Image (cartoon, rainbow, N blue to C red):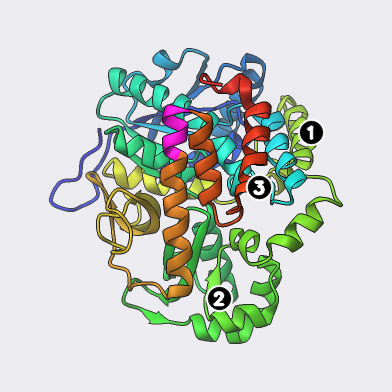
Amino acid sequence: MLHSIGGQPPNPRPAKIAVVGGGSTYTPELIDGFARLRDTLPVGELVLVDPAADRLELIGGLARRIFARQGHPGVVTTTGDLDAGVADADAVLLQLRVGGQAARLQDETWPLECGCVGQETTGAGGLAKALRTVPVVLDIAERVRRTSPDAWIIDFTNPVGIVTRALLQAGHKAVGLCNVAIGLQRKFAGLLGVGPADVHLDHVGLNHLTWETGVRLGGPEGENVLPKLLAVHGDAIAEDLRLPRPVIDRLGVVPSYYLRYFYAHDEVVREARTKPSRAAEVAAMEQQLLRMYGDPALDEKPALLGRRGGAFYSEAAVDLAASLLGGGGSPYQVVNTYNNGTLPFLPDDAVIEVQAAVGTTGATPLPVPEPDPLYRGLIAQVTAYEELALEAARHGGRDRVFKALLSHPLIGQYAYAEALTERLIAHNREHLAWA
């Protein structure tokens, strides 16, 4: 591991980083970040781990070319052997999609049959993804613990809040990561004409259920410029969120774009029934990206990757890994970690997404003013759903699935919960050991 002495940034030895799910089309974004930000996080070996050998060969080759173009001295290796890939790692990044884009397409379509939003992390589709994913992630984490007991696990696998809670409750050294906050930080910095490092977000909620209640210049105690930001740039912010400007003005905060599924649920369902799903768009984009990755002349991430999603993921991941390993990461970062009294209306073992002080001992949430009841109620209800979802993911059973669906604020009626339970199990049976 890397260590800091006397509170000063160390002169660290290069780290070994393993990326489980390294065959993802996201990976070149991550590689680009490791290459550009090598002074923040020196990497001696980057291991891409994935059972899909054909994809791994394409992406591994591109990764080596990106490192070479940037003059990075680290070595990129690939393997389908999980235990070998994570052995002696300092950090393990998880970016899995159990069932691939085919499962995502199902998550986005069958809930619509019941008049409910179909989305890969929210509502019934999000529960399906959790049920497929949590057992796989817990198995991977146990194997990491056997081979590299000191390694940090950084989870980017959705649904991040539920997956991170599963990891932490199983005693793993884990922190959850999402790119929503860093994307908003970059957006606001551009609107304000300042550098991203000058923008500190008062970010509160759960993964994919967050609000920016303040935008501060210079750090946690800096001037809150959110009112000015909304007054001058409210139209642009509302357009990005696909919510009416008057709604943003009345809230006086900036909700995550995932809040549109809650604030405009029926509108989202109507749209989804009349246009191709995001999963279909991404699947087509992935095929194009994989063809591009196979070009031996390509030695940088292609512009098309920016439309794939995950913008700024690499910068967030490098920053978090550097801080956890004792390097030069930012002192405050938005992460997913245990509540531990931060939001007093939630259990201590709930996983929240807030600004935290991050270092070699993990992430400690910064104090958060108690949220307005408008947000507090929804946070509490979705936290209860996540607890039931995790029970269903760990132990299985039709009744547990039904209860989780019934508790979700986007479902909440027994007839919907019954119908969605039947569809969820039917579409995911191959991934559910108990079904």
Return the residue at label 1: 288
The magenta segment: 390-396
Q: Viewer-proximal residue, 353 or 111?
A: 111
Left of 35 or right of it: where is 324? left
Q: CA distance from mark 2 to mark 3?
A: 47 Å
Closest to the observer: 412 or 202? 412
Q: Report if residue 40 is visible in the image.
A: no
Q: Give the secondary structure at mark 3.
A: helix
Distance from Cα at disc 3 to Cα at disc 1: 38 Å
- Residue in the foreground of this view, choosing between 75 and 312: 312
Secondary structure at badge 1 equals helix
- Type of the residue with mark 1: Gln
Q: Which x, y percent locates residue 304?
A: 74, 44
Sequence order check, earlier mark of 1 and 2: 2
Camera-side mark, 2 or 3: 3
Q: Amino acid at mark 2?
A: Gly
Q: How many marks?
A: 3
Which residue matches tag 2? 193
> 293 left or right of 159?
right
